[in-house]
Amino acid sequence: MNGLKRFSGLIAAACLLVLPFSATAGPVRLSLQDALDMARENNSTLKAAASRVEQAEARYLQTRKAYLPSVELSETMMHTNDPAAVFSYKLRQRVVNPVDLGYTERINDPDALTNFQLGLEVRQPILNLDAWNGRKAAEVARSSAGYELERAAETIELEVKKAYYALVLSRSNLEAVNRSIEAMSRHDREARKAYSKGLITRSDKLSTGVRLAELNEQKLVIRDEIRNAEDALRFLLRYDDDSPIVPEDGLEVQREHAAADAAVSVDERADLKALEAYTRAAEYRTQMAEAAALPRVNAFVQTNWNDNAFPGLDEHNWTVGLSVNWMVFDGYETIGKQQEARARELESRYLYEEARDRSRFDIRRASRMLQTAASRIDVARQSLEEARVSLDYIGERYRAGQAMTFELLGREAAYTRALMRLNRARYDYIMARHELQYARGS
C-alpha cells in the first residue's frame, strides 16, 4: 500500500512538471495592435534609428564649442640643466639673485633645476564663422534624424501589417481548404460505396481521390505560408517563442473613398521632411566650407604657478591675449572642400525632388490599388455566391444520381477558388489602404 502511494505521488509530481510546459506550448493569440506595440518596443531597426537620433543630439552638443570657452588645467614637471631653461625657470620661481648674474659660469653651466608648473588656460572664441555654420548644420541634421526615426516607425508598422495580414490570409485559406477536404472526404467515401455497388465507373471513383490529393497538397503549401508569416512576425517583433501565432483580427474591410487621396500633399511626410532638413544642412555645410577661408579670432587667458616642489603653487604669473588666424593659402584644400560641399548640396536637392515625385506616384498607385481591390471584392462576392448556389444544385443532383462525379468536382473546385479569391481581394484591399496611409505619411 505504501509503495502504491509513493508511485501515485511520483505520477502527481510528474504531472505538475509537465503541465507548465504543456500550457506554454499552446498557440499565442495576437491582435494587430498588440503586434504594433511589440514592434515599437522591441524592433531592432527602430532601436538603431533611435540611436542615430542620440548620435545627432551628441553632435549638436559638441558644436557648443563655437561660442563656449575651453578650459585646460595642466601640471608639468621639468628637471634640466639647459642654461636658457634654468634661467627662465629661476625667473618664474623668482629665485634669481645678483650672485647668479655676477658669475658667468652659473649662467653658462648651471646646476640642474627642478620646476613644477601648474597651468590654467581659458580660450574663448570671438569670431569663428565656419563653426557657427557647422552648429546650424548639426541642428538641422538633428531634426532630420528625428524625422528618419518617425518614418522608420511607419515603415516597420507597414511591414508588421503585411506579415500579420499575410498570416490572417493564409489561415483563412487553410480553413477554406479544410472545409473542402472534409466535403471531398465525404464524396470520396460515397464514391467508393457507389463503385462497390457498380453504380459509377472506376474513373469516377479515382477522380475524387485525385481531387482530395490536390487539396492535401494545397494544404501543405498553405501551412508553409503560415509558418513563413509567423517567422516574419517573430523577426519584426523580436519574439522568440516558437508557439503558433493565432491572429485575433480578420479580413474585415472598411470601405472608404480613395479618389481624392491622390491629390493630398506629401510635404508633411516624415521621410521628405528628413530629406528637406538634410538639404538645409548641406546648405549650411557649404557656408561652413566657404567661411573656412575667413579669419578666426580667439581670446585667451593663461596663468601659471611655478615651484621647485609639487604641485607648484608658489609663484604666479598670467598672460592675456587675442589671436587672429587666417589661412591665406593651403594648397587648394579649402577651395576643394568648397566645391565638394556645393556638389553635395546639389545632390541632396536632387534626391529630395526625386523622393517627392516618387511619393506622388506611390499615392496614385496605392489609390488605384484600393479602388481596384474594392471592385474585386464585389466581383468575388458575387462569384462566391454563384459558385455556392451551383455547388448546392449539383450536390443535390449528384446525391440523386442525376449528375456525374466530374461535375461535382468542378463545382467544388470553383467554390473553393472563389472563396480564396474573395480572401485575397479583402487582403489586397486592407493592404492597399495601409499602403495609401503610408504613402501619405499618416
Image (cartoon, rainbow, N blue to C red):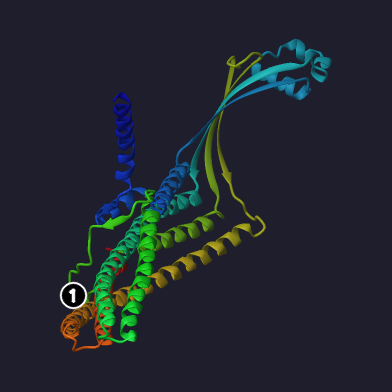
Q: What residue type is labelled 1?
A: His
Of the pair 400 and 103, the residue shown nearer to us: 400
User: Image quarter for residue 220?
Assistant: bottom left
Q: Position of residue 106 (x, y in %)?
A: 80, 15
Of the pair 415 and 161, the residue shown nearer to us: 415
User: Image quarter for residue 30?
Assistant: bottom left
User: From the viewer's perspective, is residue 284 above or below residue 118?
Assistant: below
Instruction: Decide if residue 388 is in sight here.
Output: yes
- Helix, strand or loop for disc 1: loop
The C terminus sits in image quarter: bottom left
Residue at image coords 33%, 85%: 202
159 sits left or right of 187 in the view: right
Residue at image coords 79%, 14%: 111
Instruction: Decide if residue 263 is in sight here.
Output: no
Residue at image coords 42%, 72%: 354
Of the pair 158 and 286, the residue shown nearer to us: 158
Q: Position of residue 307 (x, y in %)?
A: 63, 15
Q: Position of residue 256 (x, y in %)?
A: 18, 72
Q: Where is residue 73 in the image (x, y as percent from the top left)?
A: 55, 27
244 sits left or right of 105 in the view: left
Residue that numbered label 1 is attached to: 257
